Amino acid sequence: MGRTGGIGRMGGIGWIVLAELFVYSLPAVPALPASRALHAQDFHSTSAELVVLPVVVTDKHGGFVTDLPQDAFTVYDNGRQVPIDLFSNEDTPVTVGLAIDASGSMGPKLGEVIAASMSFVRLSNPQDEFFAIRFNDDVQPVTAASGDVRLGDADAVRHALMSIRTEGRTALYDGLMDALDRLANGSRPRKVLILISDGGDNASHATREAVLARARRSNASIYTVGILDPGDPDSNPGLLKSLARDTGGERFLPQSAGPMLTACERIAREIRAGYTIAYAPPDRDGAFHRVRVEVKPGAGRQVQIRTRPGYFAAGQSAQR
């Protein structure tokens, strides 16, 4: 399993973790009082007008650190400190997309993929919006659309996943483009995409470069689960790493059914244990903005943080 994303280390009084983030910007709104502690419904109603940052904090053993207060975090946008308008360490519902490689070579592994996916469902927030697609020679939805299924309806999810049949080639890039479009239409402020594939492509119209650019411009955190066959020349673990690194997700490379199930459980727990921070973007210039977050965890604590490494602001195109 490979861990990716912007990561920093800290320990002792006064130590600070710095991380660069890649986030999605929408029109600004007036700042709310900094002392206000916000809940999931506040993000649902107002975050469409804010930059929303999902942030994961772990200790030196990989356990999730969930008890940090808002004043432990400081956010900088292109070097300028910005006020945190919304903050939550609650289990905020998200829009979740699952993109499954259903090419012919995945046939012997499909049962393991479905079992691991259902393990993710079991540990997720029941109010999460959910959709699934499968890709082989083409791309087809497994569920009707994002928002049509909640992860609390495990029977509906299981029925949808059991309808998948494996055959043909691999249109991975086309599948990712479709999934990112569907995520953008979800109603939850946080977006998560889980890709289960070997990273290879031999049937898409879209290109690798277009997919990576689309992912970087999205507000989705992408988690990739690579099921690699050492003898397959189309396998591309590098793409899986890039997608996770550039969006603040994580790449997993399980070698068998057990680690695959563990990877999906880890993703579910990470989504539920993370922080959600939002702020009004200082500029609407269409340009790329680097964001830095500083975290002061308190005396004697050593932690790591991960989130996205930058964002493209809304507004006029940078090419004007």
Image (spheres, rainbow, N blue to C red):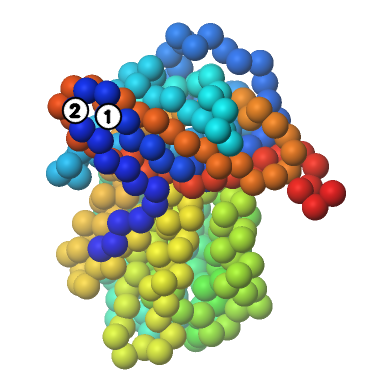
Q: Residue furthest right?
A: 320
- The amino acid beneath tag 2 is Gly
Residue underneath mark 1: 15
What is the crowding at mark 1: few (fewer than 14 residues within 10 Å), some, or many (at least 20)? some
Identify the residue at horizontal 43%, vertical 56% (top origin). 245
Q: Give SS at disc 1.
A: loop
Q: Nearer the viewer, residue 285 or 178?
A: 285
How many marks on residues? 2
Residue 229, image quadrant: bottom left
Q: Position of residue 303 (x, y in %)?
A: 24, 37
Is residue 192 among what the camera can see? Answer: no
Identify the residue at horizontal 60%, vertical 78% (top origin). 204
Q: Nearer the viewer, residue 80 or 126?
A: 80
Q: Position of residue 147 (x, y in %)?
A: 55, 43
- The amino acid beneath tag 1 is Trp
Q: Does residue 119 sit above or below 240 in this rendering?
A: above
